[in-house]
Image (cartoon, rainbow, N blue to C red):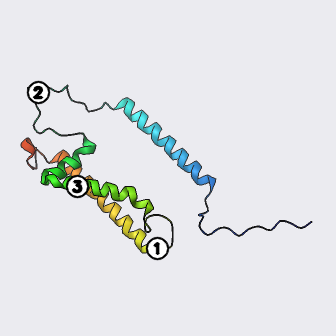
Amino acid sequence: MSAPEREPPRSDYIPSSPLFFRLIRRSMTLFVAVVCVLAAFLPAPLQEPADIGKVPNPAKSAWFLLWIQELVSYGRNLIYVVVLVAVFFLLLPYTPWGGRDDGAERSRWAVAALSIAVFSSIVVLTVIAFLFRGRNWALCINP
């Protein structure tokens, strides 16, 4: 009786290791534990209940939405840029240059550079809105 012949590996599969998934699981567990500990000891920065007679000036949204508030302060139609970027990133895995590994390193670098640029823009807009906006949403150095 002869040994069964092995099929050659398929070229459309990417080899992986179960060790990699264990590393991901451990990292996620550690991250959730750290966030839970921080949430237990750091209070949430909530304001008092809303009062129509005492509206804060400027009325800022939550810190994770400040970048959108800052962007819209430059022009109301810029919200469409946010929507288009969100749709682009949602559809990115289905594009030929964002999905499978076909050896197109140049297009992957372009997508990575675009992602870093978008992330950096969000961070810069958040910092500007959080630290440098004063009364009536005026840009100032010492708000």
CB under 8 Å between discs 1 and 3: no
Q: Amino acid at mark 1?
A: Ala
SS at mark 3 in the image: helix
Q: Residues within 10 Å of mark 3 (few under 14, many from 20)?
A: few
Q: Nearer the viewer, mark 3 or mark 2?
A: 3
Q: Is residue 98 above or below residue 76?
A: below
Q: Earlier in the sequence, mark 1 or mark 3?
A: 3
At horizontal 11% and vertical 39% (from top left) the residue drawn is 58
Q: Amino acid at mark 3?
A: Tyr
Q: Residues within 10 Å of mark 2 (few under 14, many from 20)?
A: few
Q: Label 3 to label 2, Cα distance in Å?
A: 30 Å
Quarter where residue 105 is shown: bottom left
| Residue to which mark 2 is pinned | 52
At horizontal 21% and vertical 40% (from top left) the residue drawn is 61
Left or right relative to 85: residue 92:
right
Q: Is residue 10 above or below residue 67?
A: below
| Residue to which mark 1 is pinned | 104
Q: Amino acid at mark 2?
A: Ile
Residue 69 locus on image (x, y percent): 19, 47
Q: Nearer the viewer, residue 99 or 112?
A: 99
Residue 110 locus on image (x, y percent): 37, 69
Residue 127 locus on image (x, y percent): 22, 50
Left or right relative to 78: residue 119:
right
CB under 8 Å between discs 3 and 2: no
SS at mark 2 in the image: loop
| Residue to which mark 3 is pinned | 80
At horizontal 62% and vertical 57% (from top left) the residue drawn is 17
Q: Quadrant of the C terminus?
A: top left
Q: Nearer the viewer, mark 1 or mark 3?
A: 3
